[in-house]
Image (cartoon, helix red, strand yellow):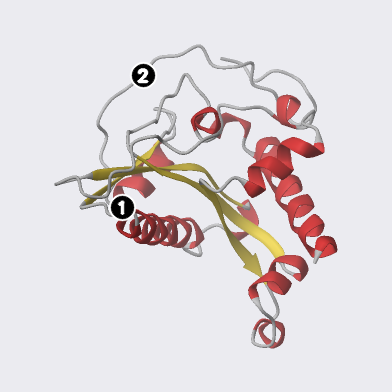
Amino acid sequence: DPDKWATIISKQKEFRLFSLRTAPEAFSSTFARESAFTPDVWEDRARNPLASTIVAVALDDDESATQDDVDILVKGKFVGITVLLGPKEESFAQASKSPWETMKVESKNSDTNDINRALYCHMNAVFVDPAYKGLGIAKSLIDEAIVLGEVRSIDRGADAVGFTILVEKENIAATKLYQKCHFNIVGEETIKSPRKEKADGTPIPE
């Protein structure tokens, strides 16, 4: 249904922009940058076969039991989101480069007969509406993304699956959450961050 598809893309866009306005310090991108995206950019992200958007939706109890997933996305309120990128044959997590830039084409190495073959997935942009924090939504999103990444990697013949996620060093709460989900700190990368802005466009002090 084209109308439902358009609604879902619009809601995903609005929630992404809401996250950038609400917690600009948590993202490498900015509201100013992504609010200028053309509709084609949002459409391409949604249709990318190497990107899976996982959404937490708030619904009334009497509604959720009678609707399929598409209707839930159309009618429900988005309260949390993450994007799983991959699987790919090489780890592609770099703080200095948008992970979307590596997701435009399938990796060329696809020999499913390799012994001890590992595939890698990257978790991008975990965000929960502050009004819904403390309910375990972020952990549920991460857990769901890990299960999905494992299934897709095994379907492609992987013997092992690696997951990466990038987080600002100062974001202690997020780091603790990821460690609770069995992520470990394996390295640090220093980059020049883009200009951070508040919702009104004023810069956030460094």
Question: Dot 1: within a 10 Å radius of its alpha carbon, few (fewer than 14), some, or many (20 or more) residues?
Answer: few
- The quarter of the displayed image where residue 63 is located: bottom right
Residue at the disc numbered 1: 180
On screen, residue 63 above or below 186: below
Seen as rendered, the residue at the extreme top is: 192
Residue at the disc numbered 2: 189
Marking on residue 17: none
Q: Residue at x 56, y 14 (%)?
A: 206
In the image shown, does 62 or 72 lie closer to the viewer?
A: 72
The percent coordinates of residue 44 (x first, y second) are 68, 41
Viewed as shown, does residue 116 lie left or right of 51? left
Seen as rendered, the residue at the extreme right is: 3
On screen, residue 167 above or below 192: below
Q: Alpha-carbon distance for marks 1 and 2? A: 22 Å
The percent coordinates of residue 101 (x first, y second) are 54, 28
- The quarter of the displayed image where residue 143 is located: bottom left
On screen, residue 193 above or below 51: above
Viewed as shown, does residue 187 lie left or right of 31? left
Q: Residue at x 48, y 56 (%)?
A: 138
Viewed as shown, does residue 165 lie left or right of 36? left
- The quarter of the displayed image where residue 164 is located: top left
